Every structure is written in C-alpha cells, then in structure tokens.
C-alpha cells in the first residue's frame, strides 16, 4: 500500500516538490484515465490563477492523452463551476487544479466524479497504489486529443444569477468584493453589477503570483479598510478557487462562519425554500448554532469536518443548506459544492429584504464559550494508543455527563499531526475549563506525551 496522498479534498503541496510535480500529475492522469475514464473516454480540466496551474494542466493533459482519453480544457474557472457543470459535459470525470486559499507557490489536484461529487477514499487509494507501482498499460493506437471549452463560464453565470429575482434586485446595495486575485476576479464583480449593486472590487488583478496574497478570505484587512472608507453596507471576501467566503458588516466586524450558516438556514426557512427542515454543520461548529436554529424551527445536524462530509450528511437528510465555520457554504439547489458567490448573493438579497444594516442583524446568537486543548505525542502510533486508553475514555464519558444540557464535549485526532484535540463548549466558562482540564490531563500520563497547547 502506498503512502496516503489524498486528503478530504484532493492532493496538495508545494509546486515542483513531490507530489505537486509534473511527473506526479502525469502519472495521476494516466492512472485515472485507465481506471475511471472507461465510458466516455473524456475528461475536463479547470484551474485557478496561480503560476504552476498551467504546468500541472499540461502534465495532466499528457497523461490523460497517453491513456487514450480526450481532454476538454476549461481554463480558469471557480471550483463550484467545475463541480456543478461537470454532469453537462458528458465526461467520465473532471479535474480542478487549485490549492484553494493557500499561497501561490502551493498547488493541488481535486478529482471530481461525472455527477459532480467527490470520489470515495477507495477510488483514490486505488489510484495511489497504481502510481506507486508505476505500471501503466498504454497503447500506441489509443491516444487522446485536447480541445478548449470557453463557454462554461457563461453557463455558470446564468445558473448563479438564478438565485436572484429578475431585474435589479441588488439595486441600492454598496458592497466591497475581495476576489483574492483568483478565479472570481472578473466573474463576481460582473454578476453583482448585473444585479444592480454598486461594487468596489479589490484583489481582482491576478498575475500568477498574487493569488491569496494579502487579500481574500485569509487576509481581510484590506477588505475591512475599504468597507469603512467607502461606507459600504458589507464586505465579501472569497478564496483563490471560490469555495470559501468571509463577510464583514458595515462597521468592519467579521462575521463568524456559524453566523452565516444560521442566516442562510433562517432565510431559506422564511422563504419556504428549506428542504428537510434541516441545516448541516460540522462537529466543530458552536453548540449555540443548534439552539438558534431550533428557536426558528430548524433542526441542526452535525457532520465530520470537511466539505465532503457536510455534503454527504445533506444528502442523507434531504437538506439543501449546509456549511463549515471556516467559510464553506453549500446551497445544493444551486451548486454541488461550496460556492462563495452563491452564498454571497443570498446574504446580499437577505440584507436588502430585511431593510436593516448588517450590524442590526448580526450576531444572530451569542456563541457559547469554547476551550480547546491540543496534546502532542512523539509519534502517531503513541497518539493512537493514548486515544484508546480506558482511563481516557472514562474521562470523556464523565465530562459529557457533567456538561450535558449546559455545553458539549468533542475529542478528535488530528489528521495531519500526532495530536489529540479536546474541545469543550459551555455556558459557564470556568466549568468548561474544568471539564477540559479533567479530560486533557489524563493524556499527560500517556506514553509518548510531549506537550500541551491551549488553542485560541
């Protein structure tokens, strides 16, 4: 079995350093071409604006072509546009080359199934094994060709604008759009202006190096400064590939992602658009979100951390609203994955409908106090052993019983480091701290214990 390269959202790393090399991209394309692209013998490839995108795209075109698969080049497009419109392309799969909110020197490869969903771990593990073995049965009689599809962006814009009523529903709205020098640099200002908004666009001049640099969802300082200077009603920042959103009000106050999830759930409920009467959030969203949604007659269901798990839970409960505190908002009536522009349009429409200022609407609820402690171990194996200690399990159970009805306990293993995270939320700050201390302190006696860190 090869070392695991695929995370919850594809493969990611520094460009020109394994696995983000042209050689790896070539082999991944050959493996996917031979195992996945067996029906239509066709694949689509999109990318964001970072410098290494063209290099990886060229390598993947070569790999797919070598495997006898035709390639449709989509050019620079938002990730949600690629996922949502993949079914219309009659391809076996699509590829999105992006490192999302990461700096320009990083890149990543996301694989998208023919129906626009993400592949299972079983599929990606098979690809990893095939790449590790390096055995590809290629034929001189079967070589693919590459073509260009440049109309997809217009189809995506039409679909995105279907969120809003006809006419100029955003007339009177003054909004700052920080496009992260990424995929939405042209699209998002155009759509908001088409719908009647007054737009101040920043971070909308991509050059290959400036994607996410001091702008976008990870660096909102310029957005806040511009909102205050322009007396805008709100600011909206997205990330490089367009699936994450951060919002600030007219005073420059950043809205927590849970507040956005709450607003979307409430808005859809009021408009009789909410399906399954359910909103999906992850296990790390604040418990006060559940209380708020319950107060407006909506059930909140929890998923694992990661957009793919949010989407899986939405499908299970028939919901069309879900999201992560980090800013991924999924409105499945309009997009198959997180789509920052769709979410931005809905929030803007809701703001205009309310007749209020953003600061008069938010916060919708007071977040519950949170205490998170990370305990690091010398190795992953020792971390796993500590996680299964009977005394640790007992401490968790005791903590859950103690805080039931007044808060919540979450214990999870880090997916990238040998750490165990203990989260405790509570109405009473001191009590939440004490519950966390009793659980986390057990780990300090475990084999391989290295350090404890209290997280902000």
Image (cartoon, grey):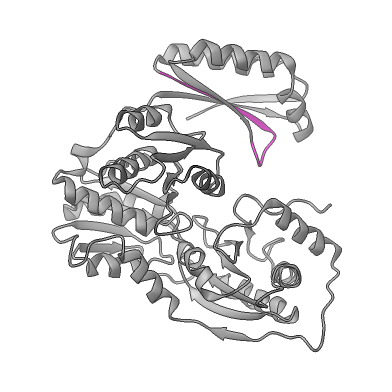
Residue 244 vertical placement versus 405 (above, below): below
Q: Residue at x 69, y 77 (%)?
A: 64
Image coordinates for residue 257, horizontal then vertical, percent: 39, 41
Image coordinates for residue 191, horizontal then vertical, percent: 29, 67
Q: Determine if residue 359 is in view.
A: yes
- Where does the magenta region start and end? 414-426
- Residue 340 versus residue 13: which sits nearer the camera? 340
Image coordinates for residue 328, horizontal then vertical, percent: 45, 49
Q: Is residue 227 left or right of residue 106?
A: left
Query: Residue 124, located in which quarter of the rendered image?
Result: bottom right
Q: Residue at x 46, y 62 (%)?
A: 80
Q: Residue at x 40, y 30 (%)?
A: 290
Q: Is residue 430 left or right of residue 10?
A: left
Q: Determine if residue 186 is in view.
A: no
- Residue 151 versus residue 117: which sits nearer the camera? 117
Residue 332 vertical placement versus 435 (above, below): below
- Residue 170 versus residue 231: which sits nearer the camera? 170
Q: Residue at x 33, y 30 (%)?
A: 292
């Amino acid at each position: 079995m090869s070392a695991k390269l695929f995370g919850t959202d594809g493969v990611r790393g520094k460009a020109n350093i394994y696995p983000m090399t042209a050689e790896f991209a070539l082999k991944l394309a050959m493996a996917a071409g031979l195992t996945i692209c067996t029906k239509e013998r066709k694949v689509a490839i999109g990318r964001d604006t970072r410098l290494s995108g063209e290099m990886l795209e060229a390598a993947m075109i070569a790999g797919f072509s070598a495997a006898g698969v035709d390639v449709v080049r989509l050019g620079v497009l938002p990730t949600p546009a690629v996922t949502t419109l993949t079914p219309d392309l009659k391809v076996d799969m699509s590829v999105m080359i992006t490192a999302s909110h990461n700096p320009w020197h990083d890149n990543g490869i996301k694989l998208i199934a023919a129906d626009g969903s993400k592949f299972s771990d079983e599929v990606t593990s098979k690809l990893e094994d095939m790449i590790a073995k390096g055995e590809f049965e290629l034929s001189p009689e079967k070589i693919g060709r590459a073509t260009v599809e440049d109309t997809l962006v217009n189809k995506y814009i039409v679909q995105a604008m279907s969120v809003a009523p006809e006419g100029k529903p955003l007339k009177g709205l003054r909004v700052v759009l920080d496009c992260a020098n990424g995929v939405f640099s042209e699209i998002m200002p155009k759509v908001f202006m088409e719908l009647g908004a007054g737009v101040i666009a920043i971070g909308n001049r991509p050059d290959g190096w400036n994607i996410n640099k001091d702008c976008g969802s990870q660096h909102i300082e310029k957005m806040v400064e511009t909102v205050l200077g322009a007396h805008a009603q709100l600011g909206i920042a997205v990330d490089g590939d367009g699936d994450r959103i951060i919002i600030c009000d007219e005073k420059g106050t950043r809205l927590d992602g849970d507040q956005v999830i709450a607003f979307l759930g409430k808005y859809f409920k009021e408009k009789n658009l909410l399906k399954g009467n359910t909103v999906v959030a992850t296990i790390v969203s604040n418990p006060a979100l559940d209380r708020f949604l319950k107060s407006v007659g909506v059930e909140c269901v929890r998923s694992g951390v990661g957009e793919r798990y949010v989407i899986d839970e939405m499908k299970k409960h028939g919901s069309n609203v879900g999201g992560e505190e980090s800013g991924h908002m999924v409105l499945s009536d309009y997009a198959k994955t997180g789509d920052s522009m769709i979410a931005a349009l809905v929030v803007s429409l809701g703001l205009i409908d309310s007749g209020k200022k953003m600061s008069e609407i938010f916060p919708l609820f007071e977040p519950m106090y949170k205490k998170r402690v990370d305990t690091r171990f010398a190795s992953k194996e020792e971390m796993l052993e500590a996680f299964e200690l009977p005394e640790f399990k007992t401490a968790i159970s005791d903590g859950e019983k103690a805080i039931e009805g007044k808060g919540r306990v979450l214990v999870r293993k880090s997916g990238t480091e040998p750490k165990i995270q203990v989260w405790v939320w509570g109405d009473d700050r001191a009590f939440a701290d004490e519950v966390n201390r009793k659980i986390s302190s057990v780990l300090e006696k475990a084999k391989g214990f290295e350090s404890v860190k209290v997280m902000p």
